[in-house]
């Protein structure tokens, strides 16, 4: 096998290099290389530059040259920084009831809601869960998503949360996409727990956290802060324990009411996700912090609720990532690019802001520094779209899919 691969000529490469993690981005600021080539060594980018020059300089016996014979636009591999793709069962009935005007309570009383998925997921064995994750991850990979965060949170007991996180760890071996696991044992108080919210979280922290470390299952702890789930006062001791053990924190915050983003800022979380209910105060607070705000348009579309105030977050100087929240309840679509484009139209985001939200800003939300930007030394994760201008990608609102997906230096989908 040859040591290097050289791909080109590529009409436009959007490197996303040297753009700020925070604040608005105008399309004029986009770093674009034209007629470019990407030289890959192993799983990393060795260099990017003018294709003809790279070809001239190339140590030919050691380089496999992959010539493109049509216009292509290259962007970093997309990163979906918030999903719940480890689950079993369908909540199509919830969706129908919601659209027929039934309330959250009526749906829960009819056996729907998160608890329904917990029941279905608990009935499914680990191997079957793994196969489900691989299938969904590969669907995402075909649309250019090369890194996928996956949460537990439908187990809600030590044994069942471990089953989910072990399923995610095993699924990582079965897909070319990178799966980043997060423990969401703090999703809701399980109906069968004999104790209050505090006691449940304390039990999880004491028993589950050490095993997560021992088995290297995740380094991220998430919780849903909402009246129907956990209050900030429940969550502080839980997050403090997690931080003391070296876990990163992420929060389901301000989805229906405020409170979660303040916890995220105070706990120096990596991200605060949802934020549909955030007001000027929360937006300001987030913008002043290093917490990445993650919009989840798939949940707004799935629930028929308002979008996260993405424009206001960016204009206040905040950092905005965009993720799919793919889950069987609130966000069943599971199509990041489509949802990010739709958020862009409703929130008046520039194409650059949309792209930043699913590349380097999403990488930041996951605390990953080796991807999301195309430059020397970064992972060779990128997508090639057969078109002559990047505007076409956003204009087609997810219907233009990459015709080549490269993950860690290999062509994994075409
Ligand atoms: O991110 N908000 C809480 N959790 C999920 C929904 C999970 C479900 O409904 O199953 C979310 O939207
Ligand atoms: Fe979620």
Image: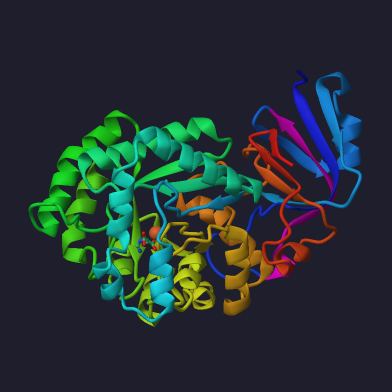
Q: Residue at 53% of width from left, 64% of height from top?
A: 22
Q: Nearer the viewer, residue 140 or 276?
A: 140
Q: Residue at 19% of width from left, 57% of height from top?
A: 189
Q: Magenta part of the protein: which range? A: 26-41
Secondary structure mostly taken by the magenta-highlighted segment of the chain: strand
Looking at this rendering, what residue extends furthest in the left direction? 195
Q: Find residue 36 and report its horizontal and vertical position in percent.
A: 83, 46
Q: Quadrant of the N terminus?
A: top right
The image shows residue 302, relative to residue 169, as above or below, that is below
| Residue 283 visible in image | no
Q: Quadrant of ligand 2?
A: bottom left
Left or right of 100: which side holds 382? right
Q: Quadrant of the C terminus?
A: top right
Q: Residue at 24% of width from left, 48% of height from top?
A: 156
| Residue 275 visible in image | yes
The image shows residue 119, relative to residue 406, as above or below, that is below
Residue 29 in magenta?
Answer: yes
Q: Residue at 51% of width from left, 59% of height from top?
A: 324
Q: Find residue 270 and report its horizontal and vertical position in percent.
A: 39, 54
Which image quadrant for residue 389?
A: bottom right
């Amino acid at each position: 096998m040859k040591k290097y691969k050289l791909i080109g000529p590529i009409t436009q490469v959007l490197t996303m290099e040297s753009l700020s993690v925070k604040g608005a981005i105008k399309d004029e600021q986009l770093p674009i290389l034209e007629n470019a080539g990407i030289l890959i060594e192993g799983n990393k980018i060795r260099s990017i530059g003018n294709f003809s020059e790279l070809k001239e300089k190339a140590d030919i016996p050691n380089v496999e040259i992959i010539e493109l014979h049509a216009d292509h636009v290259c962007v970093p591999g997309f990163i979906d920084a918030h999903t719940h793709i480890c689950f079993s069962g369908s909540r199509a009935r919830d969706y129908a009831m919601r659209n027929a005007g039934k309330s959250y309570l009526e749906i829960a009383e009819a056996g729907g809601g998160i608890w329904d998925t917990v029941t279905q997921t608990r009935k499914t064995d680990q191997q079957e869960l793994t196969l489900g994750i691989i299938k969904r991850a590969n669907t995402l990979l075909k649309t250019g998503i090369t890194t996928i965060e996956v949460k537990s949170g439908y187990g809600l007991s030590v044994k069942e949360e471990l089953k989910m996180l072990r399923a995610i760890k095993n699924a990582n071996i079965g897909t070319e996409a990178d799966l980043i696991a997060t423990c969401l044992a703090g999703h809701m108080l399980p109906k069968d727990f004999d104790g209050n919210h505090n006691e449940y979280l304390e039990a999880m922290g004491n028993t589950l956290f050490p095993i997560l470390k021992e088995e290297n299952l995740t380094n991220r702890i998430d919780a849903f802060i909402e009246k129907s789930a956990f209050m900030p006062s429940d969550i502080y001791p839980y997050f403090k324990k997690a931080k003391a053990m070296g876990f990163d924190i992420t929060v389901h915050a301000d989805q229906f009411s405020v409170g979660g983003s303040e916890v995220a800022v105070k706990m120096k979380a990596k991200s605060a996700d949802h934020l549909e209910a955030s007001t000027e105060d929360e937006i300001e607070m987030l913008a002043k912090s290093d917490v990445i705000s993650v919009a989840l348009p798939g949940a707004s579309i799935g629930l028929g609720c308002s979008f996260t105030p993405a424009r206001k977050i960016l204009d206040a100087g905040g950092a905005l990532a965009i993720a799919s929240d793919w889950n069987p309840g609130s966000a069943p679509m599971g199509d990041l690019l489509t949802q990010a484009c739709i958020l862009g139209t409703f929130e008046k985001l520039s194409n650059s802001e949309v792209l930043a939200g699913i590349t380097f800003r999403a990488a930041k939300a996951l605390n990953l520094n080796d991807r999301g930007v195309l430059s020397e030394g970064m992972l060779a994760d990128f997508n090639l779209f057969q078109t002559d201008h990047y505007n076409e990608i956003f204009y087609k609102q997810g219907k233009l899919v990459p015709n080549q997906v490269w993950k860690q230096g290999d062509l994994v989908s075409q």
